[in-house]
Image: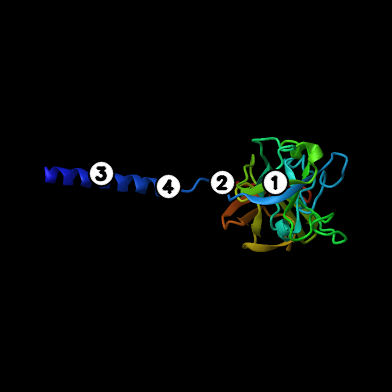
Amino acid sequence: MPSRRLFLLSLTFSLSALLVHSHYFPSTPSAAAQSDWKSARATYYAAADPIDAVGGACGYGDLVKNGYGKATAALSTVLFEKGQICGACYEIRCVEDLRWCIPGTSIIVTATNFCAPNYGFDADGGGRCNPPNSHFVLPIEAFEKIAIWKASNMPVQYRRIRCRKEGGVRFTIGGAGIFLSVMISNVAGAGDVAAVKIKGSRTGWLPMGRNWGQNWHINADLKNQPLSFEITSSDGVTLTSYNVAPKNWGFGQSFEGKQFDS
């Protein structure tokens, strides 16, 4: 009997160890893994306001035409990171005010613009986007999915999430002569781009500099060469798209490359 009890105890311990191992060592973290919720506030702009319909501090141009629609946000100084954050995705939910919040709802938006500080007002007053405030300015269409519009300046919670996009990363080529600018949009995964390289058929990989937002530039004669791009997102993942633009590319044209995993 003692030996039988020892065998059962040994078998139970072995099974427990196996269960612990399977619980704490999954194959890989989920691509949709999210950060912790943080506190912020959110306001909105109406359709008649010109803040974000076309253009914006990230340089995406016409947001509807370029696939962002109304699922966008302008970020305050402490969140905007001087444009590095452009393209990042956030989940936002309304909290703390049962009069105005729509329970059980959240929205997912892409950072496309900057909410400039107004130092003529205190951060607790009219300077809603002044440091150290974490603040989002949303299209009213997005705001009304989580709160009643009369709420105006609402406490919210937000968390950074991975972006899901349809199609590949888009490269829009601008500039003139040997000055080449590239606007990078529709980026999945981390969403924001930290480094870019470009390559012609007659060159090696050439690093590009951030001009503003997600517009990158270089002084190089790359005309009459197919163009390849290597982009690195803020989480350190690098994506290489070869021969994205054909030999006869022109300024003002957009081309689609590969896409990050979302």
The residue type indicated by label 2 comes to Asp
Instruction: Tell me how far mark 4 sits from mark 2, CA to CA.
Output: 16 Å
At mark 3, the secondary structure is helix
Residue 247 appears in the picture as rendered: no
Three-letter amino acid code of the residue under disc 4: Ser
In percent of width and height, residue 156 lies at: 70, 46
Horizontal relation, residue 10 to residue 65: left or right: left
Q: In the rendering, which numbered label is found on residue 27? A: 4
Helix, strand or loop for disc 2: loop
Residue highlighted by disc 2? 261
Alpha carbon distance from label 1 to label 2: 28 Å
Q: Reading the chain from its start, which is encountered first: label 3 or label 1?
A: 3
Give me the disc on residue 111.
none
Q: Sequence-wise, which precedes: disc 4 or disc 2? A: 4
- Contact? badges 2 and 3 (CB < 8 Å): no
Residue in front for this viewpoint, 152 or 17: 152
Which residue is identified by label 3?
12
Q: Residues within 10 Å of mark 2 (few under 14, many from 20)?
A: some
Residue 98 is left or right of residue 57, and the answer is left
Between disc 3 and disc 4, the foreground one is 3
Pointer 1 with pointer 2, Cβ within 8 A: no
Q: Earlier in the sequence, mark 4 or mark 1?
A: 4
Is tag 1's residue or tag 2's residue first in the polypeptide sequence?
1
Residue 163 percent coordinates (x, y): 63, 45
Q: Mark 1 falls on what kind of element?
A: strand
The answer to which image quadrant residue 225 occupies is: bottom right
Q: Residue at x 31, y 45 (%)?
A: 16
- What is the quadrant of the C terminus in the image? top right
Q: Amino acid at mark 1?
A: Val
Q: Residue at x 64, y 54 (%)?
A: 228
Q: Earlier in the sequence, mark 2 or mark 3?
A: 3
